């Protein structure tokens, strides 16, 4: 069997299973099995595919037909131009979250705190972009997620500039620590919205990273109420939000005493980040 024949067979199976963009996913999985860049798949299509590679590819296609995410099958996901280890214990890094990273990098910082760090993609990216003078802490309730975050920090070469602590939001932060930047992408999907999610998300990503089992705003209430105690004067708080939550979260920040509160949209024009500043005086 040639690579072309294996790919054609796989695309048909994915389409029958209702997978969107079946051709893209099949090519990505074939590239992974053959250990080549996805851009080179077209070049090797006339070549025969080995028995072991064909079997591995078929196993992946079966799993993808079950709607297991491609990233869980390959074990990695690209975020902000870098490859991160991912899996069922962490939320997949998404392009929308790059808006939060870009906004955070719009001003210099030295000490950054990432609440609910998951894969560590936010804090490690910020440290990699900011340079060797920056230091970060990531917190998460999941020890399994923190293990992945630690490996991603090593992968990006920032392991000596970041610490990870297990615990609930700001309660996990070491005593006496303060920061000039706090970032978070907390669970913001309301419980009644969960059934409508794509099965790749609903059935395979950690539920605790998706929803607060309530109205989707509970985590913002905790973060905005406590964050100022961990920020220096003029320090910034930035949170990713769902596209309908901008005004509600901005109001929380204002009520908590933050200044310069604003909403930033993503590349699709949807509300995506709410940010505020701890007053410099008072």
Image (spheres, grey):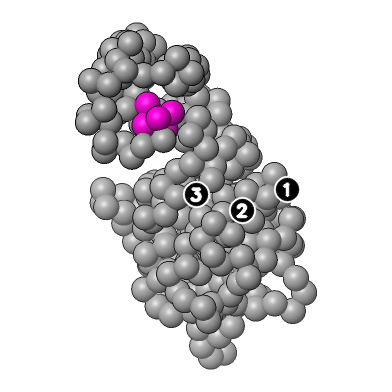
Mark nearer the N terminus (1 vs 3): 3
Magenta highlight: main SS: helix
Residue tagged 1: 143
Label 3 Cα neighbours within 10 Å, binned few <14 / some 14-19 / many ≥20:
many
Residue 27 location, x and y as percent? 32, 27
Q: Residues within 10 Å of mark 1 (few under 14, many from 20)?
A: some
Disc 3 element: strand
Counting residues from the N terminus, which is met first, the one under dot 3 or under dot 2? 3
Residue 236: percent from the left, percent from the top? 50, 74
Residue range corresponding to the magenta coloring: 30-34
Question: Residue under circle 3?
Answer: 84
Residue at 37%, 55% (x, y): give it: 81
Using the image as rendered, state which of residue 161 and residue 30 is in the foreground: 30
The answer to whether residue 137 is seen in the rendering is: no
Name which of mark 2 and mark 1 comes first in the sequence. Answer: 1
Query: Residue 67's x, y, as percent?
Result: 47, 21
Verify whether residue 31 appears in magenta.
Answer: yes
Proximity of marks 3 and 2: CB atoms separated by less than 8 Å: no
- Point out the frontmost of discs 1 and 3: 3
The residue at 61%/72% (across/down) is 161
Distance from disc 1 to disc 3, alpha carbons, whole Å, reads: 17 Å
264 on left or right of 218: left
- For the N terminus, which image quadrant? top left
| Residue 282: quarter of image | bottom right
Magenta span includes 178: no
At 61% from the left and 53% from the top, the residue drawn is: 151
Q: How many marks?
A: 3
Tell which of 222 and 19 is nearer to you. 19
């Amino acid at each position: 069997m040639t690579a072309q024949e294996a790919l054609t067979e796989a695309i048909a199976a994915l389409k029958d299973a209702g997978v969107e963009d079946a051709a893209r996913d099949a090519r990505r999985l074939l590239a992974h099995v053959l250990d080549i860049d996805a851009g080179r798949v077209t070049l090797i299509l006339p070549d025969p595919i080995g028995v072991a590679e064909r079997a591995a590819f078929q196993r992946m296609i079966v799993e993808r037909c079950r709607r297991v995410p491609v990233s869980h099958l390959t074990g990695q996901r690209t975020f902000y131009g870098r490859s991160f280890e991912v899996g069922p214990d962490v939320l997949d890094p998404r392009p929308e979250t790059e808006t939060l990273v870009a906004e955070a990098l719009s001003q210099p910082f030295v000490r950054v705190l990432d609440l609910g760090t998951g894969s560590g993609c936010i804090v490690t990216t910020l440290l990699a972009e900011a340079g060797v003078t920056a230091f970060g802490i990531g917190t998460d309730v999941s020890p399994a997620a923190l293990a992945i975050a630690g490996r991603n920090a090593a992968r990006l070469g920032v392991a000596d500039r970041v610490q990870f602590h297990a615990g609930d939001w700001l309660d996990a932060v070491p005593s006496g620590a303060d920061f000039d930047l706090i970032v978070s992408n907390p669970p913001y999907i309301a419980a009644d919205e969960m059934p409508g999610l794509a099965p790749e998300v609903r059935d395979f990503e950690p539920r605790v990273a998706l929803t607060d089992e309530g109205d989707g705003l509970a985590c913002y209430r905790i973060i905005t109420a406590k964050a100022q105690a961990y920020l220096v004067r003029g320090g910034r708080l930035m949170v990713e939000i769902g596209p309908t939550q901008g005004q509600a979260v901005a109001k929380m920040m204002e009520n908590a005493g933050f200044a310069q509160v604003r909403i930033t949209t993503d590349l699709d024009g949807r509300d995506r980040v709410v940010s505020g500043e701890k007053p410099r005086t008072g």
